Amino acid sequence: MQIPHLQTNRLLLREFRESDHDAYARIHGDPETMRYIGTGEPLDRKTAWRSLAFFLGHWQLRGFGMWAVEDKATGEFIGRVGYYQPDGWPGFELGWTIDRRHWGRGFATEAAKAALKVALPAFGRRHVISLIQPGNAASIRVAEKIGETFEREIDLDGKRVLVYGIELSE
C-alpha cells in the first residue's frame, strides 16, 4: 500500500523509514515524553523498533495509520501523528507524539489538523476520537485546538482515559 504524504507549512507527514529508528527510539525512550502514552513507561530500543514496525503494519492491515512527522526546514524526524484502531479499540483514534525538544511550537496541533482533514475523504470516517490520560493538559489543549470536545471517560486496558472527539461533515 502506498502511504499518502501530507504537508503543512512546516511539516511533512510521510511513511516511516528504517532511518527514523534512532530518533524514534530516543523520543520514545524519554520518560517525560512517554509519561502519558500507553503504559507510561519509556520504550527500550528493541521495543521502539517493534512499535515503529507496528505502525507500518497498521497501514497494511487497516488502510490508515500513523505518519512520521518531519520538520521540512531541517529534514529531522520529530515524531508521529495519525490514526490508530487495533482490534478491540474503542474508536477511530487520532493520536500524536512529538519530540520533547520541539514541544510548545505547535507541531502536534499542526500535524493533527492535517491528519484530521483527510479522515473523511481518504478514510471515510466521520467520528474521530483522541484518547488522553487525565493530567495530560498539553494533549487536551491539542485536542481542543483541532475541534475535539470531551465526550466521556472510559477504562482502557486498566487505565482511566478521557475520550475527546469530533464529528466531521463534508
Image (cartoon, rainbow, N blue to C red):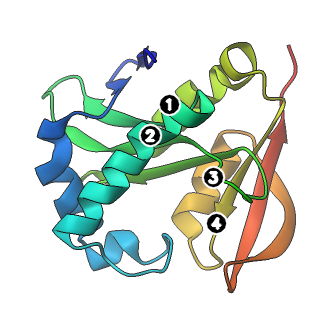
Residue at 20% x, 60% y is: 25
Q: Which residue is mark 1?
A: 60
**Contact check, label 3 and label 1, Cβ < 8 Å:** no
Q: Which residue is mark 2?
A: 57
Q: Crowding at label 2, few (<14), some or many (≥20) Cα neighbours within 10 Å? A: some
**Contact check, label 4 and label 2, Cβ < 8 Å:** no
Where is residue 158 drawn, in percent x and y?
68, 86
Residue type (three-letter) at the residue carrying disc 1: Gln
Q: Which residue is mark 3?
A: 86
Picture layout, residue 93 above or below residue 135: above
Picture layout, residue 102 above or below residue 28: above
Q: Which residue is mark 4?
A: 132
Earlier residue among tags 3 and 1 = 1
Q: From where the camera sits, is residue 150 visible?
A: yes
Question: Which numbered tag is attached to residue 98?
Answer: none
User: Distance between the Cα atoms at labels 2 and 3?
Assistant: 11 Å
Where is residue 128 drawn, in percent x and y?
76, 41
Earlier residue among tags 2 and 3 = 2
Residue at 15% x, 27% y is: 75
User: Distance between the Cα atoms at labels 4 and 3?
Assistant: 17 Å
Q: Is residue 9 left or right of residue 91?
A: left
Q: Which image quadrant is residue 157 in?
A: bottom right
User: Distance between the Cα atoms at labels 1 and 2?
Assistant: 5 Å
